[in-house]
Amino acid sequence: MNLLYRVHHPRTGRSRPAAPVNKRVARLLLTRPAALSSSQHALLGELTTACPEMTSLARLVGSFAALLRPEPGNEARLKDWAQDARS
């Protein structure tokens, strides 16, 4: 599945990659890294380094996913995660 496609820019006359749809970005962020194809990994890398907010979002999503596994101490880690997410 190619998430990037070319769109024509009316003012410059050049084509550029279009931004992926929000649902597709969310799917990339929420999919286990081992389940992503190499092209999806590359796209996710580009998206998460596009701006500091996306970098922070990807880090928070990944660290929250680790909290979903039942392990001792996750309650305290969840509180730390929530504090980190607020800042």
Image: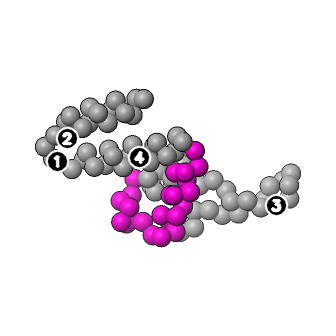
Q: Are marks 2 and 4 in contact (CB under 8 Å)?
A: no
Q: Position of residue 23 (x, y in %)?
A: 50, 51
Q: Please, what is the three-letter code of the amino acid marked with disc 2?
A: Asn
Q: Please, what is the three-letter code of the amino acid marked with disc 3?
A: Arg
Lateral position of residue 80 relative to residue 19, left or right: left
Mark whose residue sits in front, 3 or 4 = 4
Q: Which residue is mark 1?
A: 70
Mark 4 vs mark 1, CA separation in Å: 20 Å
Report whether residue 58 is seen. Answer: yes
Mark 1 vs mark 2, CA separation in Å: 7 Å
Q: Please, what is the three-letter code of the amino acid marked with disc 1?
A: Pro
**Residue 76 falls in which quadrant of the image?**
top left
Mark 3 vs mark 4, CA separation in Å: 34 Å
As drawn, 33 above or below 51: below
Q: Residues within 10 Å of mark 1 (few under 14, many from 20)?
A: few
For label 2, the SS is helix
Q: Measuring 25% from the left and 47% from the top, which residue is drawn there?
A: 68
For label 1, the SS is loop
Q: Measuring 36% from the left and 66% from the top, which residue is drawn there?
A: 34
Residues 23 and 48: in front is: 48
For label 4, the SS is helix
Mark 1 vs mark 3, CA separation in Å: 51 Å
Q: Earlier in the sequence, mark 1 or mark 3?
A: 3
The prevailing secondary structure element of the residues shown in magenta is: helix
Q: Earlier in the sequence, mark 3 or mark 4?
A: 3
Q: Which residue is mark 4?
A: 59
Mark 3 vs mark 2, CA separation in Å: 50 Å
Q: Are marks 1 and 2 in contact (CB under 8 Å)?
A: yes
Q: Which residue is mark 2?
A: 74
On residue 14, the disc is 3
Boundaries of the magenta span: 30-51
